[in-house]
């Protein structure tokens, strides 16, 4: 896979209760931005006006309304490419992208590799490029998305694939779930010192109403139990919850995901 290390200018736009729509600045054309997963148009339009930028393209990771519902209104400002996975539940796409394909926006100086990451939904994709990962609802900081459509085997394979990206990768997730995810992570793996330190940092950020994202892969592989299903401490936590031995990391993942679904 190709990947360049140009640091991207990316700004968060808050939407709904806890969604982030990410605006990627073109490294080539000042004032042109790409919106990732615009579930709402109004906050995107407000931010474009505030920073004096215009929309150049839309990237979509999956079909859920809180990630795509703002597209029609954004297109009323003018047509732009709408790039997403092969799924009829995503209307208005102008370009369909598939696993391992390059997604090139040459006028903007942007290129992403496409990773098909089924699990949260079956057609979910992630965009990876310029040292950044836009992963929708597949990987969250200290957690992962619910499995609405996929199997534990699919979802854990998807997460392992993301976890294998370079440690310096910045991770732009679809939701601010970090604090709640860390409560679960530290229930599974209470002695994880990296997670304990991260919990304190996240608490300070959230108290100041600052996003905890982007995260970084080098942190996630230390604190995120769903990326650490092969670690002894995580397996032990999952076995204690399941009350039986778990041999394979995929079994550990399945127990953790079902446990998290019930966790409050
Ligand atoms: Zn979703």
Image (cartoon, grey):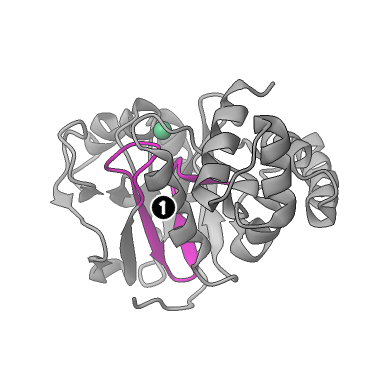
Q: The C terminus appears in which quarter of the rendering?
A: top right
Residue 190 is a magenta residue: no
Whether residue 132 is visible, yes or no, is yes
Q: Position of residue 83 (x, y in %)?
A: 23, 50
Q: Position of residue 155 (x, y in %)?
A: 42, 45
141 or 27, nearer to the observer: 141
90 or 35, nearer to the observer: 90
Q: Residue at x 31, y 67 (%)?
A: 108
> In this figure, which residue is indicated by the disc labeled 1?
158
Q: Residue at x 20, y 51 (%)?
A: 81
Q: Position of residue 254 (x, y in %)?
A: 51, 38
Residue positioned most to the front = 244
- Looking at the rendering, the stretch of residues picked out in magenta corresponds to 117-140
Whether residue 141 is visible, yes or no, is no
243 or 167, nearer to the observer: 243
Figure disc tally: 1
With respect to residue 56, does 169 lie above or below?
below
Q: Is mark 1 within 8 Å of ligand 1?
A: no
89 or 155, nearer to the observer: 155
With respect to residue 261, does 110 lie above or below?
below
SS at badge 1:
helix
| Image side of residue 206 versus residue 132, left or right | right
Q: The N terminus appears in which quarter of the rendering?
A: bottom left
With respect to residue 92, does 96 lie above or below?
below
């Amino acid at each position: 896979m190709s990947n360049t290390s140009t640091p991207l200018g990316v700004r968060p736009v808050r939407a709904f209760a806890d969604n982030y729509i990410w605006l990627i600045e073109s490294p080539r054309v000042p004032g042109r931005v790409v919106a990732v997963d615009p579930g709402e148009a109004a906050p995107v339009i407000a931010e474009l006006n505030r920073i004096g930028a215009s929309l150049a393209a839309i990237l979509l990771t999956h079909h859920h309304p809180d990630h795509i519902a703002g597209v029609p209104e954004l297109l009323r400002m003018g047509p732009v490419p709408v790039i997403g996975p092969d799924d009829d539940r995503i209307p208005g796409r102008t370009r369909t992208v598939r696993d391992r394909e390059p997604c090139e926006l040459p006028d903007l100086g942007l290129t992403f590799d496409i990773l098909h990451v089924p699990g949260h939904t079956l057609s979910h994709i992630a965009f990876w490029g310029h040292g950044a990962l836009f992963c929708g609802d597949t990987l969250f900081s200290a957690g992962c998305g619910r499995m609405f459509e996929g199997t534990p085997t699919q979802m854990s394979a998807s997460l392992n694939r993301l976890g294998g990206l370079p440690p310096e990768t910045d991770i732009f997730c679809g939701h601010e779930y970090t604090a709640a995810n860390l409560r679960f992570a530290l229930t599974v793996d209470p002695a994880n010192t990296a997670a304990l330190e991260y919990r304190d940092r996240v608490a300070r950020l959230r108290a100041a109403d600052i996003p905890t994202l982007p995260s970084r892969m080098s942190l996630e592989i230390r604190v995120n139990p769903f990326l650490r299903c092969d670690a002894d401490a995580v397996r032990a936590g999952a076995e204690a919850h399941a009350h039986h031995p778990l041999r394979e990391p995929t079994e550990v993942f399945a127990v953790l995901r079902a446990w998290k679904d019930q966790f409050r």
